[in-house]
Image (spheres, rainbow, N blue to C red):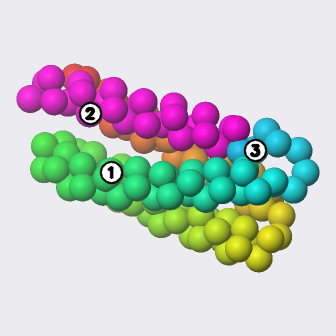
Amino acid sequence: MADRHRAAAEQLLQAHRELRAELARVREHPGPLPRTLRTHCLTFCANLHTHHTREEGAFTRFEAEFPELAPAFARLRREHQVVQATLAEIERLLASRNDVRAELDKLAGRLEEHFAYEERQLIPALLA
């Protein structure tokens, strides 16, 4: 069980590192996003959605093993919904060719807060 928990912790941290790096690449380009970055932005949105979908399944399993983390899992699920709404707005703006900078900035702030909380709450339990 400990090996599985350590692997889950590392997988979570690796996914967060990759998602942070992808978002930074999208955000670093000044001005309106060129076509390739718009495509990359949509890919990022899809990857983040996939990450959260997979987490939901993991949360269900880990809740049974770590009942003391139920409040953390509830908060993380609520945050997933807020992030998903932001992603939907970014996709809408991209489809209409509007600038997405403000939404990307909001997303970056929300994700950093979300990832940091998730890491503070889950990683110590998984590595214990």
Q: Tell me which amino acid carries mark 3.
A: Arg
Residue 78 lies in what quarter of the image? bottom left
Q: Earlier in the sequence, mark 3 or mark 1?
A: 3
Cα separation between marks 1 and 2: 10 Å
Mark 2 sits on what residue? Answer: 8
Q: CA distance from mark 3 to mark 1?
A: 25 Å
* Residue 126 appears anywhere in the view: no
The answer to whether residue 46 is left or right of residue 123 is right
Q: Which-is-in-front pick, marks 2 and 3?
A: 3
Residue type, numbered disc 2: Ala
Density class for disc 3 (Cα within 10 Å; few <14, some 14-19, many ≥20) is some
Q: Nearer the viewer, residue 28 or 2?
A: 28
Residue shown at 24% from the left, 55% from the top: 57
Tell me, for residue 55, which label it has, or none.
1
Query: Upstream in the sequence, badge 1 or badge 2?
Result: 2
What residue lies at 42% left-to-right and 41% top-to-bottom?
Answer: 118
Residue receiving disc 3: 27
Dominant secondary-structure state across the stretch colored magenta:
helix
In the rendered image, residue 44, in percent from the top left (x then y), is placed at 57, 51
Residue 107 placement: quadrant: bottom right
Task: Report if residue 23 lies within the magenta region.
Answer: yes
Q: Which residues are magenta?
A: 1-25
